[in-house]
Image (cartoon, rainbow, N blue to C red):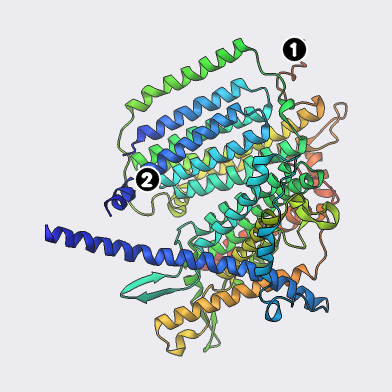
Amino acid sequence: MIILQTLSARLPDILFYLFAGLSLIGAVQVLCRRNPMNAAVSMVVTVLSIAVLYILLSAYFIAAAQMIVYAGAIVVLFIFVIMLLNLSAKEIGRRRYTLFKAFAAFVAAAVGVSLLPGVRGAPRAISEQPIDPSFGSAKTVGRLLFGEFLLPFELTSILILAAMVAGVVLAKRDITPNRTFSPVDAILDLLLKSDRKDKSP
Amino acid sequence: MITLQEYLTVAALLFSLGLLIVLFRNNAISILMGIELMLNAANINFVAFSQSLGGLAGQVFALFVIVAAAAEAAVAIAIIVLMYQNLGTTDVEKAKNLNG
Amino acid sequence: MEGGVGIESHLFMDLILDLLPILVKMLVGFFVVLTTTAYLTLAERKFSAYMQDRIGPNRVGPFGLLQPLADGVKFIFKEDVVPNHVHKVFYIAAPALMLVPALLGYVVIPFGDSIELFGRTITLQIADVDIGILYILAIGGLSVYGLFMAGWASNNKYSLLGGLRASAQMVSYELTLGLSVVGALLVYGTANLRQIVLHQTEYWTLFGSIQVPHWGIFLQPLGFVLFLISAFAESNRLPFDLPEAENELVGGYHTEYGSMKFAMFFMGEYTGMITISALTVTFFFGGWHIPWIEHAGLTHNVVAALGVLAFLAKTACFLFLFIWVRWTLPRFRYDQLMSLSWKGVFPAALLNVFGTALCLYVLRRPM
């Protein structure tokens, strides 16, 4: 009984340590694994653990977005390319020079250490229960997104459009250096040609 | 008892790991993964502060970061595919044609 | 001291009574879904047999009803071969990664209204999540990992092709699946699946007396068609079963799999079908709601129990549709699949969202 009670009281803490640990282990695996496929799968572990951390912070909508966009699209894209190019461990090739690696480790450690005072100085409290139950739900986040942050939201849609155009233009196969290239023609080509076999990644 | 500090520590560690990956790795895809990890670390901070301060603006910003990451990944992946087609490798050290 | 113990045990009873319905719902849900999965394989074989003027399995038990049991025994007792050339960890993890998301999906789907038992109101849903549909989309997005992992770990060109096809197809159709329900979400104004069903229990009154239920199919006919197309593609069923196309890729991503591992892929596919059928019913066919039952004068619990049956019957109809389509239509070519997604379903879904938003703006505008 008492075990049950303490367990249910400590459950968020246990979940936090479990998934924070998992996310860090995943990140270390991304660093250490030479096979790109293993690295990508470790990346999935990290991304999903971070989604659980968002749920613990009662940011349910962000957690769902994290899972749909990161785990469902971005990492799948990585894996798609790894499979398409059939990258293997040998593809990674030799590692960088030891001196450079030492320098890299030093820089990363320095950045990590320099972030720590900010951590210690941060306001300590994190509310156990959210102030109101709709905190972080799709509705409240959506209201803010389409109200106060409407302009940035529209700007992100332009960003995505730009990325889409860039993706299409880059992925087109028949770009030769000596042909004058116009992005407008490329898009028109794509729209008019109905029997394209490949799709842009 | 989990406080904001724990979340910020995790985020700081993730960020340094992401940076380390970017600096350590030659493979363009691994470098991209490192960048995504750094963005994720920033997102943890946004969401943790949003919960701690009781405002939702942090979560909205996390959403923007996710969108930006998706756009970035799409373009970067296209560039990596092109690089592989032209150079036969995704090693960023090999892409130094402009290096005289 | 005495009182303290009394309060303690009282709290304990409360805790048990709170936990018990949840545990029962979880166990019953799990059992029902797995049993349906098993019998769906039999149904598939039986219906395909009738469609092709055959009899189908009829050796094990009356009308072959014990066939799934026999299949299960066969799968379990077959030798579990791990080929030499595979990536061991991924090869073994892949079937589990296919099955687990499929089994996680159905928990947010409401299979009935609430019932009153021992003075407690028990909602007939395993988890009432506020972001229900987003949860299902997120979980559905994870099932692609099982597919590509199987394809890659098998280290075989057919499997790799299957895995490649699977990841491209799933990403494309996940997008259209999500976009095709946006119109419905705009109408219902919530992502909570229980609220969505409750919204559909209302009626329009036509010609003074005829009551028409508020079902999503009437509100979002185009959205329903697009959702169904994407659902077929998401669950890798014919006419969209390119990842495993037998006559091109041997077996696609599961070419190298045998015994229980193959069975897990199989179960994952069928469980995914059940989830997506239940979701279709929830979104477009009023969930557990039986039209006009309010006039029958039955008690709340009876209506709820009938509602569960109605929900199961509606879901069964869609499962039959899945089987029917599989044995009727030929397979798409790969470029046709992709152009259907990006040039057909995707623009149509965008148009649907735009049209719905416009209609809602005009109808709900303060006069």
As drawn, C237 above or below B54? below
- In the rendered view, does A19 fall on the left or right side of C340? left
Q: Residue furthest right?
A: A178
Q: Amino acid at mark 1?
A: Asn
Give the residue number, with chain letter if any, for mark 1: B99
Residue at screen point 42% across, 89% down: C297
Label 2 packing within 10 angstroms: few (<14), some (14-19), many (20+): some
Q: Amino acid at mark 2?
A: Pro
- Which quarter of the image is occupied by the C terminus of chain A? top right
Query: What secondary structure is marked by label 1?
Result: loop
Q: Are marks 1 and 2 on the same chain?
A: no
Q: Can residue B6 be seen at all in this image of the molecule?
A: yes
Q: Nearer the viewer, residue C219 or C321?
A: C321
Give the residue number, with chain letter if any, for mark 2: A12
As drawn, C202 above or below A29? below
Chain letter of mark 2 equals A
Q: Can residue C366 be seen at all in this image of the molecule?
A: no
Return the x and y of residue C186 as percentages of the image width and height.
54, 61
Spatial CA distance of label 1 from label 2 is 53 Å
Label 1 packing within 10 angstroms: few (<14), some (14-19), many (20+): few
Residue at screen point 43% across, 52% down: A140
Chain letter of mark 1 equals B
Q: Nearer the viewer, residue B20 or A24?
A: A24
- Which quarter of the image is occupied by the N terminus of chain A? bottom left
Q: Closer to the observer: label 1 or label 2?
A: 2
- In the rendered view, does C301 fall on the left or right side of C78? left
Return the x and y of residue C159 as percentages of the image width and height.
77, 47
Query: What secondary structure is marked by label 2?
Result: helix
